[in-house]
């Protein structure tokens, strides 16, 4: 007898991306119809993202419900998914071990993998996913690239929109001549010998492609904070974790990156280092997605077991070892956006927990999708949708109007600050938060390290 919903913890099965059936279009269509019919009968996920309203609209327009929906219309449902995992982690009552075995995000991933194998995926998004290639090349011409990609550049941004389909109104990440890895080499860290954790913890900071090439300030803040907490640090970046390739469903490339990066990180684990990821998406990849894509790789398993999110790590140090005194209040307060990929790690709201360690500092929490992820909020086909999905977040952050807006997802933070700034400009009021930040940068401010 089938059960209505499940109270058990969700579990995930390895992704069978190496099997022929995974790419069989008839088998995929059958599975999508099965899952979509169950989703149509439940509808708990109606307010998570636009995939579900699009699906339900398709069904509601047909007198025969799912039987009348055309398979060629499934692409609209697939397009709107950001692979945030929130339906799987927080809403769906039919995930494994329930007998219905629903995993909506990985079904969408499979649909994209079929398209990728046929070579029909978007050229621009594939090129944007080449993070290491792009970041290395951009180092040498970063001022020119940042000028050309500036949102207010009326010469280049319309051209980028017409040729590369990058929405002219979207803020784009900046590149740096000096990466986090090179900056760390040129500025050795001094570990605080008076801190309670001194001599007890060692952390290898997995730089991540975004922090290394686009936001080295996050990495430098993380290293400064951990050094002040008495933690010995080492910066490591063997390469991208492959999340951009996952979004494009290039699973063989994700597997290759997982093997390459984990092989190097294991060497640090053997020397006593914890692995600390500096962005939420990369933490999710190392902990959860890699083991599902290459489940037989022993190095990947070891890395998954040894990996912490940076906020999670600071909270763990505070709990196990204690923190040095000297944190100063930030009376202007902080709005904390809990990124979907941080929530999907099933570790609790560690960004908020960490920032609440700062005395006499207002901390507001927003636990809702910002609408951005990967290229989703950048490319023309989905930019407006990213704004639509994130609008409740923007309004809440605007009402709070704290001095800092932070997120574990750097793209979400940038997206939120831009949209909140536009709301403030419309009503002619001041936006107190001046730039998108990572929660670890707030900890650095509280300790006077910035």
Image (tube, rainbow, N blue to C red):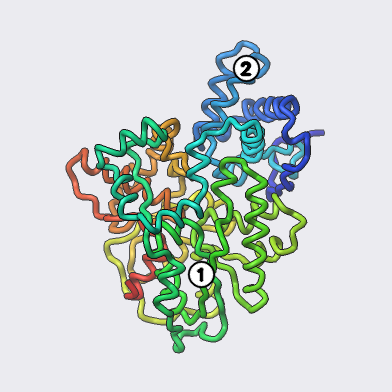
390 left or right of 253 in image: left
In the figure, residue 328 lies in which quadrant? bottom left
Which of the two residues, 110 or 77, is positioned nearer the viewer here? 110
Residue at left 40%, top 63%? 216
**Residue beneath label 1, please?**
315
- Horizontal side, residue 204 vs residue 22: left or right: left
Compared with 247, 136 (above or below) is: below
Q: Residue at x 75, y 28 (%)?
A: 27
Q: Is residue 57 above or below residue 81?
A: above
Question: What residue is shown with label 2?
Answer: 69
**Label 1: element kind:** helix
The Cα atoms of the two marked residues, 2 and 1, are separated by 48 Å
Tag of residue 8? none
For the view shown, which residue lies furthest in the top direction?
A: 63
307 lies above or below 292: below
Quadrant position of the N terminus in the picture: top right
Earlier sequence position, callout 2 versus callout 1:
2
Classed neighbour count for the residue bearing mark 2: other residues with Cα under 10 Å, few (<14), some (14–19), many (≥20): some
Q: For mark 1, does the 10 Å Cα neighbourhood hold few (<14), some (14 to 19), or many (20 or more) residues?
A: many
Q: Position of residue 401 (x, y in %)?
A: 28, 51
């Amino acid at each position: 007898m089938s059960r209505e919903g499940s109270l058990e913890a969700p579990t995930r099965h390895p992704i069978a991306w190496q099997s022929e059936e995974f790419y069989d279009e008839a088998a995929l269509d059958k599975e999508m119809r099965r899952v979509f019919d169950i989703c149509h009968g439940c509808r708990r996920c109606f307010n998570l993202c636009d995939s579900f309203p699009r699906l339900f609209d398709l069904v509601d327009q047909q007198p025969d419900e799912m039987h009348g929906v055309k398979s060629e219309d499934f692409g609209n449902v697939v397009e709107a998914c950001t692979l945030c995992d929130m339906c799987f982690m927080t809403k769906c009552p039919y995930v494994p071990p329930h007998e219905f075995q629903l995993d909506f995000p990985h079904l969408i991933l499979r649909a994209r993998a079929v398209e990728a194998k046929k070579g029909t995926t978007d050229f621009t998004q594939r090129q944007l996913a080449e993070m290491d290639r792009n970041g290395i090349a951009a180092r040498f011409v970063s001022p020119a690239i940042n000028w050309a990609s500036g949102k207010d550049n009326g010469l280049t941004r319309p051209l980028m929109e017409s040729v590369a389909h990058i929405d002219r109104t979207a803020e784009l990440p900046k590149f740096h001549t000096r990466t986090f890895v090179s900056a760390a080499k040129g500025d050795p860290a001094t570990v605080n010998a008076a801190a309670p954790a001194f001599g007890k913890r060692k952390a290898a900071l997995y730089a991540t492609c975004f922090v290394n090439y686009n936001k080295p300030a996050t990495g430098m803040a993380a290293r400064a904070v951990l050094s002040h907490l008495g933690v010995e640090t080492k910066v490591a970046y063997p390469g991208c974790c492959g999340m951009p390739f996952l979004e494009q469903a290039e699973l063989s490339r994700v597997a290759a990156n997982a093997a390459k990066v984990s092989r190097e990180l294991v060497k640090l684990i053997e020397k006593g280092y914890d692995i600390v990821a500096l962005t939420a998406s990369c933490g999710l990849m190392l902990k959860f997605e890699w083991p599902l894509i290459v489940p037989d790789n022993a190095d990947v398993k070891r890395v998954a077991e040894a990996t912490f999110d940076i906020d999670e790590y600071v909270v763990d140090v505070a709990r196990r070892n204690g923190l040095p005194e000297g944190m100063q209040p930030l009376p202007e307060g902080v709005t904390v956006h809990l990124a979907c990929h941080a929530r999907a790690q099933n570790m609790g709201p560690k960004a908020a927990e960490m920032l609440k360690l700062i005395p006499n500092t207002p901390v507001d929490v927003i636990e809702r999708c910002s609408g951005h992820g990967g290229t989703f909020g950048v490319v023309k086909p989905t930019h407006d949708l990213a704004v639509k999905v994130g609008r409740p977040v923007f309004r809440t952050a605007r009402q709070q109007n704290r001095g800092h807006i932070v997120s574990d997802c750097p793209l979400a933070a940038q997206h939120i600050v831009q949209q909140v700034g536009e709301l403030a400009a419309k009503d002619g009021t001041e936006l107190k938060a001046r730039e998108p930040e990572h929660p670890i940068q707030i900890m650095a401010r509280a300790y006077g390290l910035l």
